[in-house]
Image (spheres, rainbow, N blue to C red):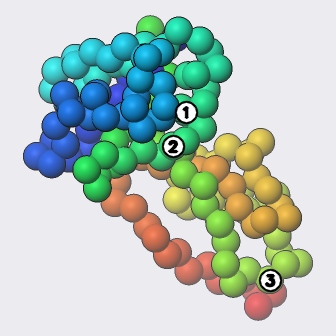
């Protein structure tokens, strides 16, 4: 029951201070142990699954005005491991009749990997896994043949 993390701006983010600050910010200072793994990586160990899940739901994460990645620890590491950050993305300016699962998935896939189960048609939003190694896109224009 662990989350592994990585700072994205090591010049501004002191891992030791992050490890002291974040459990308190989450209100779990007595229920989390933290370890500095070196090279900007760290580990949070939880005593309950509920605490772990409550922290994951609070993401994306930031410390000292810079983002950090926090994901569930996996015994098998792949190329994207601990570089992916889930973001909630909301669409603005898209006509309501175009708010379909297919359209939202197609639009979202231009930013990152869309969690199809997270698409909320009534809100026009979805959770997208973004690769933190690529620049963030705050605005993306989309053209429609129906417009």
The foreground one among 119 and 141 is: 119
**Compared to 22, does 4 lie above or below?**
above
- Whether residue 54 is visible to the viewer of this picture, yes or no, is yes
Q: Which mark is residue 75?
A: none
The x, y position of residue 47, in whole percent, is 53, 9
- The image quadrant of residue 141 is bottom right
- Whether residue 103 is visible to the viewer of this picture, yes or no, is no
Identify the residue position indicated by label 2 in the image: 59
User: As drawn, which residue projects farthest toward the left?
Assistant: 11
Determine the CA span between mark 3 and mark 2.
29 Å
Q: Is residue 27 found left or right of 145 in the rendered image?
A: left
- The disc, 3 or 2, on the residue closer to the chain's N-terminal end is 2
The x, y position of residue 78, in whole percent, is 41, 22
The x, y position of residue 85, in whole percent, is 46, 43
User: As drawn, which residue projects farthest toward the bottom?
Assistant: 147
Identify the residue position indicated by label 1 in the image: 56
């Amino acid at each position: 029951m662990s989350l592994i993390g990585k700072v994205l701006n090591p010049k501004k983010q002191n891992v030791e201070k992050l490890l002291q600050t974040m459990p308190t910010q989450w209100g779990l200072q007595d229920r989390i142990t933290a370890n500095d793994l070196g090279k900007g990586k760290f580990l949070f160990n939880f005593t309950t699954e509920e605490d772990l899940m409550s922290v994951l739901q609070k993401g994306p994460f930031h410390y000292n005005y810079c983002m950090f990645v926090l994901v569930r620890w996996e015994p098998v590491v792949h190329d994207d491991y601990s570089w992916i950050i889930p973001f909630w993305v909301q669409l603005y300016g898209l006509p309501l009749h175009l708010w379909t699962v297919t359209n939202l998935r197609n639009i979202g896939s231009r930013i990152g990997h869309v969690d199809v189960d997270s698409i909320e048609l009534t809100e026009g939003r979805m959770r997208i896994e973004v690769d933190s190694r690529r620049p963030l896109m705050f605005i993306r224009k989309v053209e429609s043949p129906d417009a």
